[in-house]
Image (cartoon, rainbow, N blue to C red):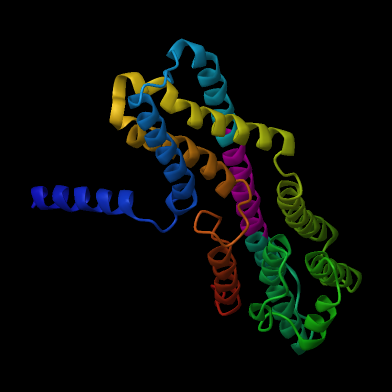
Amino acid sequence: MLGQLKSWGALQWFRVALQLHGSVVPAVLPRTLISGLFGVLISILYKLGLPLDLPVVVVFVPNVVLGLMLVFRTNTAYERFWEGRKAWGSLVNDVRNLARLIWVAIQEQRPEDREEKVKILYLLPAFAVATKQHLRQECLPEELQPLLSPQQLQRLKSLNHPPLQIAFWIGDYLQQQYETGRVEVYQLTIMVERLNSMVDALGACERILMTPMPLAYALHLKQLLLLYCLSLPFQMVEGLGWMTGPITGLISFMLFGVEEIGLEIENPFGRDPNDLPLDTICGKMKHNIADLIHSNRLI
């Protein structure tokens, strides 16, 4: 039994290692082929007698510089990815806490108060969905329709920043509950802090989105990477001969892949396989709110 599990684990490892969905292989394959074919060309010219071999010591400094730049590029991209994930994790917690406070702390003095609370609770996942679409720079999706009234949805379509309008509606409701005596001042303070934290998470995501990698750095890295991959055949042709092309392609594939990974994850709010699963996160928020509304208090 244990041997079967190990065999299944090995097969699963190879299946993941060889899958194309979510990998950078399709993006870097054309560049890799060009580098490999250039290596084949250099091999042919070298065999014809042209002195094209280049001592490895000449490119030692470019090797070190390129390695440091690739490491910095990848680390910076992952830092942006992780900061985006933390911002959305904070948003999930704030939505849950604010929903619980609204549902429990605000008193229901009239029959219609409960219905009003339900509408406000659905504004919380609506804020998350609107934030997702705002970060993706897309139009408001159909998934907002069950969460908002037709008037609210029509109002949001005319705005440049729908999440802030939803936050305003929530804040206005909380203030009205305080003015009518349904919530105490310390409870209002806690709720407003949760709402402010939601807006802060939105601001953190906007900071990532609106602060791209400096163009000069990105261009210089690409130029250095291209020059290095094109110089590889000159370094290896004397020792490898006809294997220069395949080895050049393999090394280029690794380097281009590392750079492409940085490009994939530096903006984590899109729809690519390597982006954050924002659709799933928003769906869980909606399920959490529905569970809260339909839950029964323990007596």
Specify whether residue 138 is in view.
Answer: yes
Pick whichever, 97 or 150, lies toward us. 150
Q: Main secondary structure of the magenta part?
A: helix
Instruction: Tell me the quarter of the picture where residue 146 sits.
Output: bottom right
Tell whether 195 sits left or right of 63. right
Q: Is residue 93 above or below residue 282?
A: above
Instruction: Tell me the quarter of the picture where residue 65 sits.
Output: top right
Magenta-highlighted residues: 75-94
Q: Residue at coordinates 81% horizontally, 81% vertically from top-left?
A: 152
Can residue 86 be found in the magenta stretch?
yes
Q: Residue at coordinates 73% horizontally, 34% vertically from top-left?
A: 216
| Image coordinates for residue 210, horizontal then vertical, percent | 76, 49
- Counting every numbered tag in the picture gives 0
Q: Residue at coordinates 56% horizontally, 56% vertically from top-left?
A: 276
Can residue 29 be found in the magenta stretch?
no
Q: Quadrant of the C terminus?
A: bottom right
Pick whichever, 24 or 12, lies toward us. 24
Q: Is residue 152 above or below residue 176?
A: below
Q: Residue furthest top?
A: 57
| Image coordinates for residue 7, horizontal then vertical, percent | 14, 50
Tell whether 186 sits left or right of 143. right
Tell whether 86 sits left or right of 230. right
